[in-house]
Amino acid sequence: MPNEFIKYEKKNKIAYVTINRPEVMNSLHPPAVDEFWQAWCDFRDDPDMWVAIVTGAGEKSFCVGADLKYRAVNFKGGTIPTPPGGFGGITNRYECFKPIIAAVNGYALGGGFEIALASDIIIAAEHAKFGFPEPTVGLMARGGGVQRLSRQVPLKVAMGIILTARQVSAQEACRIGLVNEVVPLKDLIPCAERWAADILRCAPLSVKASKETAMKGLDYPLEAAINNRYQYLEEMLNSEDALEGGKAFAEKRKPQWKGR
């Protein structure tokens, strides 16, 4: 069945996930979140997809979080149910170690900011803005936003954003280390694709092992993190690609990665 609220495309080992509700600033309601969940499951399980780029349709908004009007009408203002993967099918997902690039094409607020924070790399259009407006409507960023932000930028900077509900420009987000690169809107997807191309030059198991080790290692003291055992590290060391890398280097040619 074709998707109604997102676009999901695959090309050259890159999965493109686009929130397609520009008429409501790409806010998400349960049917859209369910489509997101299914797309991320497919990306995770497809051996031919090595990198994902997530963005929003239109020029104004990446995602402004949950569709509050939909919630008010259909859930009487109560909590909207979400799938096991959390908001956007990604904020509570911890088993996918393929890299995800967020191409933020406008407002990334509330749950939209949380989707960006759950990604590995953030590219922002010059007019993009980030923030957690939830406290202004009696809520909080409970989809991992306050926890991720306070781990990804200095604590006082994070608390300033969290407690004031103020919006942060793309330029300030880059200055504090939250965003990797800021570009004009017309260059947003090409820039994300350049980052993806750099990732694709690397062996996919090496990339997955690196992400898994870095992310899981955050839970341990340094010595324990270094000496811990990681699934994709073991797979990488015993892979065909590990042999291919050394062989290609010795033969002075481009390696032909197989992902196994």
Image (cartoon, helix red, strand yellow):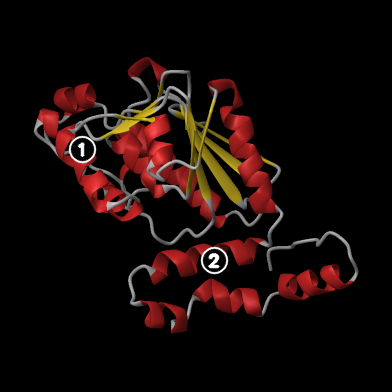
Residue 12 quadrant: top right
Q: Please tell me which residue is depicted at 62% across the width and 53% down the height of the picture.
A: 50
Query: Which residue sits furthest top?
Result: 23
> Label 2, on which residue?
210
Location of residue 20 in the rendering, given as x and y in whole percent from the top left corner = 45, 25
> Label 1, on which residue?
80
Residue 202 quadrant: bottom right
Disc 2 on helix, strand or loop? helix
Residue 109 visible in the snapshot: no
> What's the residue type where badge 2 is placed?
Ser
Q: Please tell me which residue is depicted at 47% across the width and 18% down the height of the picture.
A: 59
Q: Nearer the viewer, residue 205 or 35?
A: 205
**Circle number at residue 186:** none
Q: Nearer the viewer, residue 150 or 208?
A: 150
Mark closest to the chain's N terminus, 2 or 1: 1
Horizontal side of residue 59 vs 260, given as left or right: left
Numbered disc in front, either 2 or 1: 2
Q: Nearer the viewer, residue 202 or 163?
A: 163
Q: Nearer the viewer, residue 41 or 121?
A: 121
